[in-house]
Amino acid sequence: MGSVSPLIAIHQQLTKNNQQKIKDYQVLWLGTRTGPERKIVEKEGIEFKAIAAGKLRRYFDLRNIIDLAKIKIGFWQAFFIILKFKPDIILSAGSFVSVPVVWAGWVLRIPSIIHQQDVRPGLANRLMAPFAARITVALDVSLEDYSKNKTVLAGNPVRQSLVTSDQSLVMGSEKFEFKNNLPILLVMGGGTGALKINELIWESLDELTKFCNVLHLTGKNKNKNYPLLITHYSSQYKPFEFLTDKMADAYQAADLVVSRAGMSALTELAYLKKPAIVIPIPNSHQEDNAKYFAQKDACLYLDQRKTSSDQLVKIVRELLRDGNRRRELGENMHKIFIDYSGKHIIKEVLRYSA
């Protein structure tokens, strides 16, 4: 899901400025048949076609053999789709489904732009970089990971729904039907939820609800085993599987956020200057993201393997009591990215679409 958000943001900008930007603008999205991105893409009115996709791992795994075959199938599927659609440009944000698409585009002499969000360059982008016409990166630290003559610092674009909701004046307690004026803690574990973060919150509810309201994005089917707990704390605890239509409202309502360290989520928090406690997935690229933000004093970084519910409660309480510290974290986070509009990426798109 992380690779979907910046591409949707670019599409929204191109659509918004269509008449001034690209004549006869058309877009086709290639993704996986079972991926969660399909609903989001089609909701934007974008035509979606599914191709086979395989994930290559940096370690020995028998699944690599099967996935190599999927990549070959995906290459030929992408080849014939591109041949028929005749795009001017291919745009990717680093997912493995993009690899055969960019390779097929290179064979057909269709230029590609790939966008690097995370601090640690992903294997998919490593595989695509030699075949890309341009590489845009979200962070200055990533400039040294790719060829200097075709890499551009671009920041990270945010979706239009966040931009249009930026001036919202409706109080979060009203939007989410909290019956008090306590501060609001937003908890989110990524597109599919995070069981460990969920457990930390559930274990902490007795204490958390003494001084704040909790908006909790649990992920699909992650809260069905806790009906009594949810009912008991219902006046101050609102769990949701997803908040697709209300995500901008949830961000706006939040006084503090507990989040994973996917770059799309961090970018949205940074744009809105939201103070965050970041708990990355252990042994993943998210740890690099969290460390980078923490070094910039732009978040509080907690190690999932060492954090207890008591520690989490203590940190949340201290931050909610300290408005100056929250503002400082939010401001520092906002400064991480040079741009949120996508204008630098759009400039590169237009270069190859003229």
Image (cartoon, grey):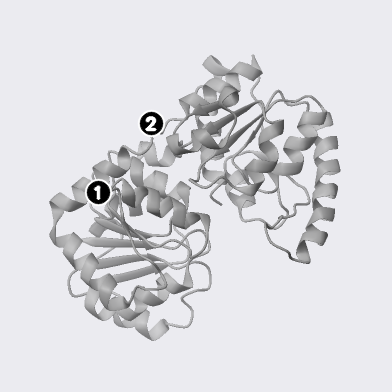
Mark 1 Cα-neighbour bin, 10 Å: few <14, some 14–19, many ≥20: many
Image position, residue 72 (x, y; %):
84, 48
Residue type at the position of mark 1: Leu
- Give left or right: position of 107 versus 149: right
Can residue 212 be seen at all in this image of the molecule? no
Q: Is residue 268 above or below residue 108?
A: below
Image position, residue 163 (x, y; %):
37, 37
Q: Residue at x 78, y 51 (%)?
A: 52
Which residue is disc 1 drawn over? 329
Spatial distance from mark 1 to mark 2, Cα to Cα?
A: 17 Å
Which residue is disc 2 drawn over? 338
Asked if the residue under mark 2 is in contact with the one under mark 1, i.e. CB atoms within 8 Å, the reply is no
Q: Is residue 39 above or below residue 187?
A: above
**Of 262 and 238, the residue lying toward us:** 262
Q: Residue at x 28, y 71 (%)?
A: 312
Can residue 1 be seen at all in this image of the molecule? yes
Residue type at the position of mark 2: Ile
- Give left or right: position of 174 versus 139: left
- Give left or right: position of 330 versus 67: left
